[in-house]
Image (cartoon, rainbow, N blue to C red):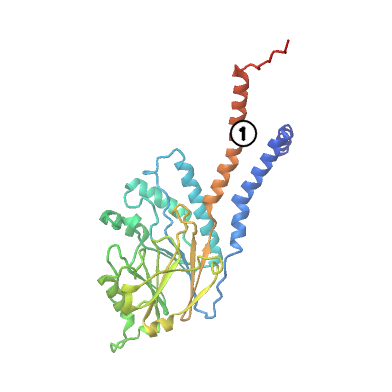
């Protein structure tokens, strides 16, 4: 059966005009590159992080996936756009998990594009889709925190209490997660202004401060140090973070500043130029603790639908008191889609030009002029 189909296809191909044969071959090569080769080649660029300590914790950071909904986008191609976006997210997530072999996977909010406004029926559908795109790992702990697209609370959009309760019900949001004796992760929610008030592990039975015995990570959808408020100062004072991971801005940035000068904080690009794109950055967390210097890393979005050119996943490792961090950059899918538009526009344009020339030839009423010969 397959052999007969191949034979028929070959005959049809050979009957095509030579120009069309070249076009079909080029189109096939473009599809092969865009849908297979480019993903494989991109993985070779990713950096590996090598740990020295036996209790090293590897963390995969997923920011702003914002899987597309079906309520607001009513374009005729919305279904195809959702499919392509889901497929892109799922493929790279699977490869990132395989590359990192994480102990912890942290989703930094904005999991869904329409999480705040969706009906119960649509939310259930989106939740199922999200689980298919980002399946739980059998050995890694998954942590989910909400973003403004999940529960509201940014700008003029008020916090949606129903969406807030729904997110906690479906994604088991918690105020903190104890990973091991050396590491605790705190959910610092700048949208709801909720956090753990204190951690009993930070003092011993005598009341002495023993916070230097383990590391503390803040995770937040919105940057914590940007535009500091009383909530920010309280969280920092009570829980003394060694590092902060946040999202929301869709770009890769970081900030280091003494906790007494938060009002002057400035974020700088991190791994966003060709020279350092795949570099593994090292930060001495014990130094930051001794000097009371705060470190915040903003993880870029992993979705190509966020109108930024550079997209990827954050990869961090807590190796003793050293934080190692790099970005697993992914391909610019929009460029691949544009190449398809250009490729399909060529024969369409040539076809229109052919019909136009044919029309002019058949309907032109112009007659050639003849000059009289001299008498």
Task: Classify residue 147 by image quadrant.
Answer: bottom left
Pick the front one: 150 or 142 = 150
Rendered position, 39 above or below 279: above
Residue 239 seen by the camera: no
- In the picture, the quarter occupied by the N terminus is top right
Q: Residues within 10 Å of mark 1 (few under 14, many from 20)?
A: few
Estimate the x, y position of residue 81 in percent, counting from the top left.
47, 45
Helix, strand or loop at label 1? It is helix
Residue positioned 57% across, 70% down in the render: 48
Residue 125 seen by the camera: yes
Residue positioned 36% across, 57% down in the render: 170
Apparent side of residue 241 relative to residue 88 in the rendered image (left or right): left
Pick the front one: 124 or 298 = 298
Residue extending farthest to the front is 375
Question: Number of marks in the image?
Answer: 1
Estimate the x, y position of residue 369 in percent, counting from the top left.
65, 17
Residue positioned 62% across, 19% down in the render: 362
Estimate the x, y position of residue 143 in percent, counting from the top left.
40, 65
Pick the front one: 303 or 372 = 372
Rendered position, 341 above or below 272: above
- In the picture, the quarter occupied by the C terminus is top right
Task: Classify residue 10 by image quadrant.
Answer: top right
Residue positioned 59% across, 64% down in the render: 45
Apparent side of residue 176 relative to residue 20 in the rendered image (left or right): left
Residue extending farthest to the top is 375
The residue pinned by badge 1 equals: 350
């Amino acid at each position: 059966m397959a052999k007969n189909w191949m034979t028929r296809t070959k005959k049809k191909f050979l009957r095509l005009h030579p120009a069309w044969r070249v076009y079909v071959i080029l189109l096939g090569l473009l599809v092969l590159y865009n849908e297979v080769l480019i993903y494989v080649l991109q993985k070779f660029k990713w950096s590996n992080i090598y740990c020295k300590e036996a209790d090293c914790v590897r963390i995969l950071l997923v920011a702003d996936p914002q899987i597309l909904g079906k309520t607001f986008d009513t374009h005729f191609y919305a279904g195809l756009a959702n499919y392509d976006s889901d497929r892109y997210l799922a493929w790279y997530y699977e490869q990132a998990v395989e590359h990192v072999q994480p102990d912890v996977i942290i989703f930094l909010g904005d999991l869904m594009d329409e999480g705040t406004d969706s009906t119960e029926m649509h939310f259930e559908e989106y939740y199922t889709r999200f689980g298919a795109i980002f399946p739980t790992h059998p050995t890694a702990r998954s942590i989910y925190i909400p973003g403004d697209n999940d529960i509201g609370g940014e700008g003029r959009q008020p916090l949606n209490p129903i969406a807030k309760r729904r997110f906690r019900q479906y994604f088991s949001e918690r105020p903190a997660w104890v990973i091991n004796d050396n590491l605790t992760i705190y959910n610092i929610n700048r949208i709801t202004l909720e956090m753990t008030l204190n951690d009993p592990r930070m003092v011993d039975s005598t009341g002495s401060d023993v916070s230097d015995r383990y590391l503390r990570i803040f995770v937040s959808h919105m940057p914590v140090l940007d535009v500091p408020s009383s909530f920010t100062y309280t969280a920092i004072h009570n829980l003394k973070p060694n590092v902060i991971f946040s999202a929301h801005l869709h770009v890769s940035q970081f900030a280091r500043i003494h906790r007494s000068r938060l009002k002057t904080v400035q974020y700088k690009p991190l791994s966003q130029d060709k020279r350092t794109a795949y570099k593994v950055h090292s930060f001495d967390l014990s130094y930051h603790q001794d000097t009371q210097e705060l470190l915040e890393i903003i993880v870029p979005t992993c979705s190509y639908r966020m109108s930024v050119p550079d997209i990827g996943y954050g990869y961090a490792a807590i190796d003793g008191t050293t934080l190692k961090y790099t970005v697993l950059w992914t391909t610019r899918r929009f460029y691949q889609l544009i190449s398809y538009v250009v490729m399909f526009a060529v024969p369409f344009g040539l076809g229109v030009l052919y019909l136009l020339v044919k029309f002019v030839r058949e309907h032109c009423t112009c007659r050639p002029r003849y000059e009289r010969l001299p008498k």
